[in-house]
Image: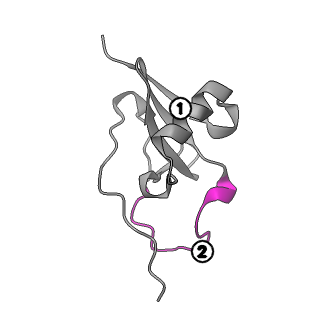
Amino acid sequence: MGKKRIIKKFEQLSPEMITQFNQKFPDGFEDSLITFANPKGEIELAVPFETEDTYYLIKMPKNSRASDDDDDNDNSYDGFDNFENLEIADDVADDDDDD
């Protein structure tokens, strides 16, 4: 049997999980952020995080988004509602363009 898959809000992580999260991302998690559309069609930001027995998708607070006016976000997945077969791509785009 595979690992459990859980979507959890960052604010709801236990102190132990926050410590593990900080150890996995000591230099920040910006390069690991993904976006997806929740069942309501709202864009969510999340970070994939794996423990020994569970695969988490940690939803970040909406105010953690780097740019709320980024209209050409190529990382959103409209209509994505099948979290049981969730796979995270390794090619998260950089939003560091300062044009």
- Name which residue type carries label 1: Gln
Residue 35 located within the stretch drawn in magenta:
no
- Name which residue type carries label 2: Asp
> Residue 34: in sight, yes or no?
yes
Q: Residue at x 61, y 34 (%)?
A: 18
Observer-nearest residue: 65 or 72? 65
The prevailing secondary structure element of the residues shown in magenta is: loop
User: Crowdedness of circle 2 by 10 Å Cα count: few (<14), some, many (20+)?
Assistant: few
Secondary structure found at label 2: loop
Where is residue 54? Give x, y as percent: 44, 22
Look at the picture and state if 33 lies above or below 97.
Answer: above
Q: Give the range drawn in magenta.
A: 62-77
Give left or right: position of 40 versus 90.
right
Q: Residue at x 60, y 74 (%)?
A: 69
Where is residue 97? Give x, y as percent: 44, 80
Look at the picture and state if 9 lies above or below 90.
Answer: above
Q: Residue at x 62, y 25 (%)?
A: 16
Name the residue that disc number 2 marks. Answer: 69
Q: Which residue is drawn at 58% across and 66% down?
A: 66
Where is residue 14? Give x, y as percent: 66, 26
**Residue 62 sits in quarter:** bottom right
Where is residue 59? Give x, y as percent: 57, 42
Give left or right: position of 18 versus 4.
right
Q: How far apart are marks 2 and 1 (CA)?
A: 32 Å
Look at the picture and state if 82 lies above or below 94.
Answer: above
Secondary structure found at label 1: helix
Observer-nearest residue: 57 or 81? 57
User: Crowdedness of circle 1 by 10 Å Cα count: few (<14), some, many (20+)?
Assistant: some
> Residue 14: in sight, yes or no?
no
Image quarter of the N terminus: top left
Name the residue that disc number 1 marks. Answer: 20
